Amino acid sequence: MNSRTKKVAFHTLGCKLNYAETSTISRQFETAGYEKIDFSQTADLYVINTCSVTENADREFRKIVNKAKRQSPDSKVAVIGCYAQLRPENIVATSKVDVVLGMKEKFNLIQHLDFDSPEELPLVIQDTEVDELHGCTPSYSVGDRTRSFLKIQDGCDYPCTYCTIPLARGKSRSIDPEILVNQAMEIAAQGVKEIVLTGVNVGDYRFGVEITLIDLLKRLDDVEGIDRIRISSIEPNLLTDEIIDFVSTSKSVLPHFHIPLQAGSDKILSLMKRRYGVALYKDRISAVRSVLPDAGIGVDVIVGFPGEGEREFQDTYDLLDSLDISYLHVFTYSERPNTEAIDLPGKVSMRDRKARNKRLTQLSDKKNQTFALRQLNQSKNVLLESNHDGVLTGMTENYLKVHINENGQTELNRIVQVELTGLQNSKILASLPD
């Protein structure tokens, strides 16, 4: 490498866990003397951290590679993450890239770079025995002044028939709570107010024999300077009464749960190999509402899974319509190689998949509006995140985005108490105290 400072740009696809890991890798490059720049600028190296949950993520990846090469034809392109682990041959066949690293080697990217190498073939390192991945590299995101994603766990032991994540990330393993507390203190020292706990299966956090998620929450609740802690997502069978009760009394863990459902039909849940049925899911929503009546509750749901006829979809729709929830994340089922679901009978047409997605998206809008209306005329604490043309935006503790007319003196990255005053074109309006 010559003496000129090399410029590196990063692009992240997929989940919050990927964002945490990208941020950690970017800090490695900055420590090594690289200048980190925006992906839209001309760089010497473009790093793309990939996802392979859906076919859309695969297509998005190819667009990003092409964009990088158009911006800087002589640049190097490194591809890391789940897609790099699962389908390196596809990446090499369809994209002009220089380095492809699987899950185990992505944190060693710097060591695999040689800007002066005449070698034309890309370097590809795939971890063939993903189940033997040991350890769990600690990671957290920085750059957003208000919020940081803190990785507490990686991998998954749940063999859901539609999911490639266990193939890409291996078995469930968790990070030492002492390391996580220290990282939370580092995050607090940078002025970040909110931490989002992230992983592949956060509720499965367990370190050693006795330490589980509830123990970690209690430890992090005592970290000075972190005002807010969110649990990114938690499986319904892992959301215990003890966790719910602790959130109700915690000083920093927020009353917001994102609880994947995936299907409201026991038949489809069984085909998916989910670890619960409809009855347990309903019980968990009721358990949250009985203790935290104003908690935000988000739900993941998949439409168009093999075997989902009109009856099974209607069961899902009716269940979601009946539940006291805040919003939905609706996913259209996407066939993924090397999953059990790809060989299941009862394939749903793309036309029906799209139509069902639209119906549930509309239901999500209705649920979100109903939940927001119930919160009006209440006081909420809002973390101020942005100011556009005199309108402040931020999130309440129960995950409502609010819009506040700025009074000329309010700084961002502060938690302020506001009153929710109304809805305007689906926007939640709030006012600052006089």
Image (cartoon, grey):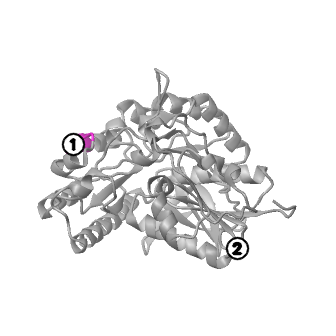
**Is residue 134 a member of the stretch shown in magenta?**
no
Cα separation, mark 1 vs mark 2, equals 53 Å
Nearer to us: label 1 or label 2: 2
**Which of the image's four quarters has the C terminus?**
bottom right
Q: Quadrant of residue 276?
A: top left
Question: Residue at image x 69%, y 42%?
Answer: 188
Left/right of residue 211 with respect to residue 325 in the rendered view: right
- For disc 2, the neighbor class at 10 Å (few under 14, some 14 to 19, many from 20) is few
Highlighted magenta segment, given as a residue range: 275-283
Depth check: 52 or 14 in front? 52
Residue 252 x, y percent position in the rendering: 55, 40
Q: Where is residue 313 in the image (x, y as percent from the top left)?
A: 18, 61
- Tell me, yes or no, whether the highlighted magenta stretch contains residue 279: yes
Horizontal side, residue 308 vs residue 214: left or right:
left
Q: Mark 1 points at which residue?
A: 277
Badge 1 element: loop
Q: Is the magenta stretch mostly helix, strand or loop?
A: helix
Amino acid type shown at disc 2 = Asp
Under circle 2, the secondary element is loop
Asked if residue 433 shows in the view, the reply is no
Q: Mark 2 or mark 1, which is nearer the start of the sequence?
A: 2
**Relative to 132, is 48 on the left or the right?**
right
Residue 359: image x %, image y %? 26, 69
Q: In which quarter of the image is the N terminus?
A: bottom right
The amino acid pointed to by label 1 is Gly
